[in-house]
Image (tube, helix red, strand yellow):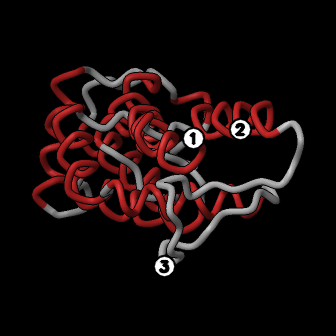
Amino acid sequence: MAFNKKSKTKEPENKEKAYEYAVFLLSLQLRTVGEIREKMIGRGYSSAVIENILDQLHQQKYLDDERYAEVYLENLKQYKNLGYYGIKKKFMLKKLPADIIGKILDEGLSVEEELKIAKRLLKKEGAAVSSSDDTEASDNTYNIYNEEQGKQKQKLAQKLKARGFRGDVVAKLVY
């Protein structure tokens, strides 16, 4: 097979093998430019070859970090209970450029959406969360019937903060 360990750094200038390796990586799963670059550096290809292959893949529309980030954000919003900073961390682990991260998060994750995700997490944790159409005199949307209300609120606030929710989202839901 062309991708065995023995051929790891034999031909750092071989564009054909570098291209085959990059396409092989993309056939396993979608990846970002940064992830492909890191894998190819690990395989021992020269930086000139890597950049050439990345440009070629981008022109062929096999690599598009912005589109990847949009799809990844939608999946995280739907299937994970993460806030703004939690999602930002996931993006950074995927080696996405900071400008794309900022743009996609600003456009694709509103405070209202983050509130919905936080409510979903709190419901999953068994906390009583009022719906947005409840008409209460107070602004607090979090309600727990317990003599240790303060401690419970702190625990839930910490859980939300640990999941990367913004401070104003935590404050709206818990306090």
Residue 19 % position (x, y): 30, 47
Q: Which residue position is annotated with label 3?
A: 133
Counting residues from the start of the chain, the first of labels 3 and 2 encountered is 3
Residue occupying the point 44% across, 34% down: 167
Q: Tell me the amino acid under the disc marked 2.
A: Lys
Cα–Cα span, label 2 and label 1? 7 Å
In this figure, which residue is indicated by the disc labeled 1?
A: 175
Residue located 77% across and 57% down the image: 127
How packed is label 3: few (under 14 Cα within 10 Å), some, or many (20 or more)?
Answer: few
Question: Is 150 on the left or on the right of 79, as rendered?
Answer: right
Residue position for label 2: 153
Tell me: 66 left or right of 165.
left
Q: Secondary structure at mark 3?
A: loop
Residue furthest to the right in view is 147
Tell me where residue 170 appears, x and y as whole percent: 52, 41
What residue is drawn where x is 54% and y is 53%?
140
Residue 161 place in picture, x, y as percent: 57, 33
Distance from label 1 to label 3 (Cα)?
18 Å
Mark 1 and mark 3 lie on one chain; the one further toward the N terminus is: 3
Say if 125 sits above or below 75 in the image: above
Position of 63 with respect to 42 (left or right) is left
Question: Which of the two residues, 138 or 165, is positioned nearer the viewer here?
Answer: 138
* Amino acid on which disc 3 is placed: Asp
Label 3 near label 1: C-beta < 8 Å? no
From the viewer's side, name the closer residue of 34 and 114: 114
97 vs 116, left or right, is left
SS under mark 1: loop
Asked if the residue under mark 1 is in contact with the one under mark 2, i.e. CB atoms within 8 Å, the reply is yes
| Quadrant in which residue 120 is drawn | bottom right
Asked if 34 appears above or below 112 in the picture, the reply is: above
Q: Earlier in the sequence, mark 2 or mark 1?
A: 2
10 Å crowding of disc 1: few (<14), some (14-19), many (20+) = some
